[in-house]
């Protein structure tokens, strides 16, 4: 078992790699990411109509399946941006793997198993964040905005504006859900631990509420709550992850929170 673990965590011989070799490896990994991105963009272009209606579905009742454009090239460029955004999402796992594979030798003790765990965790959390934003928060927020006082306002939504709004919103949700993955890395490097995260829990709740207010599309209290709750849940999940990855005693942290030094045995009776 010890030999297997050593084999998984054995770093490459970095002493023999020159600056030119490092740059050559970096160039090779960037090219691999670029090839995957271009291939994904080409595939997404052929499915652009399906992707379009998929992103339009949350506002189907308000927009009736159609969007407007105000310039000759706007519709074409909207489809191009849509294909590029889709390619970006599907390239994220490849990018994460190539980025970590490049820097892994510097922290070789973490090993290949840690790399696969991190990539799987980060990719799964990003997909979960996008799915939660798409199926839960986006329909409520978008329809709330589009149906605002229809007696006085008539919605004239362009394809470029709508797609930019939806894609950025879903991307924000995906990034928010990456907090446990970032905590996993920080705990593995012994930069964070569960007591530290618990100590700043109240600060995190305030920050999450402010972020939810800024990122929520509808700006109504219900949508803000729907966005703030998963953010708080991700923070609590991060505490659990940090506790198992980097276990430390809670006693020193509790003493610091109390603001008093520990009482010695028999001191209370003196």
Image (cartoon, rainbow, N blue to C red):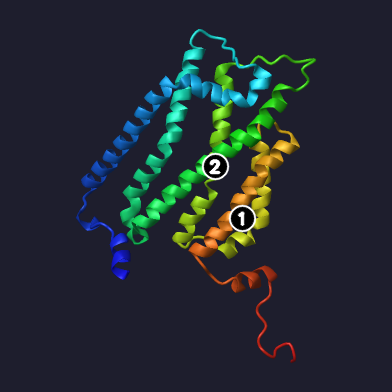
Where does the image place residue 250, in percent across and percent down from the top left?
60, 70
Position of the N terminus by quadrant: bottom left
Position of the C terminus by quadrant: bottom right
Looking at the image, residue 236 lies above or below residue 168? below
Where does the image place residue 249, in percent across and percent down from the top left?
56, 72
Left or right of 217, for residue 102: left
Give the class, few, some or many, for how many residues have Cα within 10 Å of label 2's Cα (few <14, many ≥20). some
Foreground residue among 259 and 239: 239
What is the quadrant of residue 105 in the picture? Answer: bottom left
Looking at the image, residue 38 lies above or below residue 67? below
Helix, strand or loop for disc 1: helix
Residue in the image at 46% along x and 21% along y: 48
CA separation in Å, label 1 and label 2? 16 Å
Left or right of 47, for residue 144: right
Left or right of 35, for residue 147: right
Where does the image place residue 164, in percent across and percent down from the top left?
55, 25
Whether residue 193 is visible to the viewer of this picture, yes or no, is no
Looking at the image, residue 151 lies above or below residue 7? above
Helix, strand or loop for disc 2: helix
Residue assigned mark 2: 128
Give the class, few, some or many, for how many residues have Cα within 10 Å of label 1's Cα (few <14, many ≥20). some
Residue assigned mark 1: 236
Looking at the image, residue 179 lies above or below residue 266? above
Residue in the image at 32% along x and 70% along y: 2
Residue in the image at 73% along x and 87% along y: 268
């Amino acid at each position: 078992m010890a030999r297997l673990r050593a084999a998984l965590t054995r770093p490459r011989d970095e002493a023999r790699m020159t600056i030119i070799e490092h740059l050559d490896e970096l160039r090779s990994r960037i090219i691999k990411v670029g090839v995957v991105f271009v291939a994904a963009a080409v595939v997404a272009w052929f499915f652009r109509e399906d992707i379009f209606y998929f992103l339009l579905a949350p506002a189907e009742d308000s927009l009736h399946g159609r969007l407007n454009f105000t310039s000759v090239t706007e519709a074409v460029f909207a489809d191009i941006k849509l294909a590029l955004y889709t390619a970006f999402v599907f390239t994220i796992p490849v990018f994460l793997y190539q980025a970590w594979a490049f820097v892994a030798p510097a922290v070789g003790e973490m090993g290949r198993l840690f790399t696969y765990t991190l990539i799987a965790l980060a990719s799964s959390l990003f997909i979960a964040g996008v799915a939660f934003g798409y199926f839960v928060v986006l329909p409520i927020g978008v329809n709330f905005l589009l149906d605002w006082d229809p007696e006085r306002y008539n919605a004239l939504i362009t394809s470029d504006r709508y797609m930019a709004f939806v894609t950025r919103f879903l991307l924000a949700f995906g990034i928010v859900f990456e907090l446990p993955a970032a905590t996993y890395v920080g705990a593995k490097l012994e930069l964070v631990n569960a007591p530290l995260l618990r100590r700043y829990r109240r600060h995190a709740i305030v920050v999450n509420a402010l972020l939810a207010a800024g990122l929520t599309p509808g700006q109504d209290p219900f949508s803000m709550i729907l966005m703030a709750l998963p953010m708080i849940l991700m923070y609590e999940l991060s505490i659990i992850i940090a506790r198992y990855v980097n276990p430390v005693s809670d006693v020193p942290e509790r003493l610091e929170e109390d603001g008093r030094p520990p009482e010695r045995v028999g001191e209370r009776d003196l």
